[in-house]
Image (cartoon, rainbow, N blue to C red):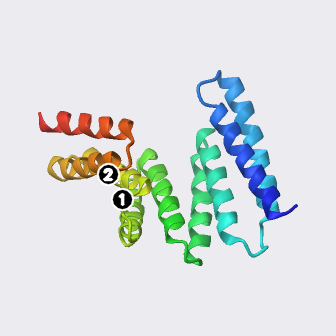
Amino acid sequence: MTHEEARDLMASAWETRRRAFGVAPEKKRELLGRAREELKRALARCQDDGTPVLRAQALHLLANVESDLGNPEPARALWEESVSILRGTDDTLQLAHKLRHLGDLHRRCRRPDEAEVHYVEALELYRAQEDPGSLGVANATRSMAALVESRGDTERALELWRETRDLYAAVEVAEGVAEAQGRIDRLSN
């Protein structure tokens, strides 16, 4: 199996995962199980073959599937492995992306301190890039805003939600703009 075949398996698994949204629970588990198997096959082929970023991406995709299946601890371990691999590369945008997802998992599992550590690092990496106005920055800022809001720091949350709104506006993601504006309106009243 070549790298292209591994990429094809990953793309197929991701599409299968997308089809799992909005279907009956049994069908969802079936589709996610299929995606999991495709990703495991892809991972087996990019184990130690000199493509660490590809392996980190496959781990990230599998972590998403495990999270979708309600398996937070396997997802955490997969994201941590992905982050560990990416720390050995110069792909800081991929590292920032995986850190944000790991932070999101910690936040969902009610581990806000761990989430914050990952969000802070992800935002630092994103903002160190020449073009910090990306969807990744918007998503990471949104995650941090939600965390800060959950801690009751209304003033800081408002700052972050305003920044989130502006970042989503810059990349033309209307749903993100609407969500951020809704949070701003709610926190302002």
In the image, 45 versus 72, the foreground residue is 45
Location of residue 16 by image quarter: top right
Spot occupied by residue 138 in the image (x, y as percentages of width and height): 37, 52
- Which residue is tagged 2? 167
- Which residue is tagged 1? 133
Identify the residue shown where x is 30% and y is 49%: 164
In the rendered view, would you say 128 is above or below 159?
below
1 and 2 marks in contact (CB < 8 Å): yes
In the rendered view, would you say 42 is above or below 87?
above
Classify mark 2: helix, strand or loop: helix
In the image, 94 versus 60, the foreground residue is 94
Identify the residue shown where x is 60% and y is 39%: 68
Identify the residue shown where x is 38% and y is 49%: 171
Identify the residue shown where x is 64% and y is 44%: 65
Which disc number belongs to residue 31?
Answer: none
Which amino acid, by three-letter code, is at mark 2?
Leu
Q: Quadrant of the C terminus?
A: top left
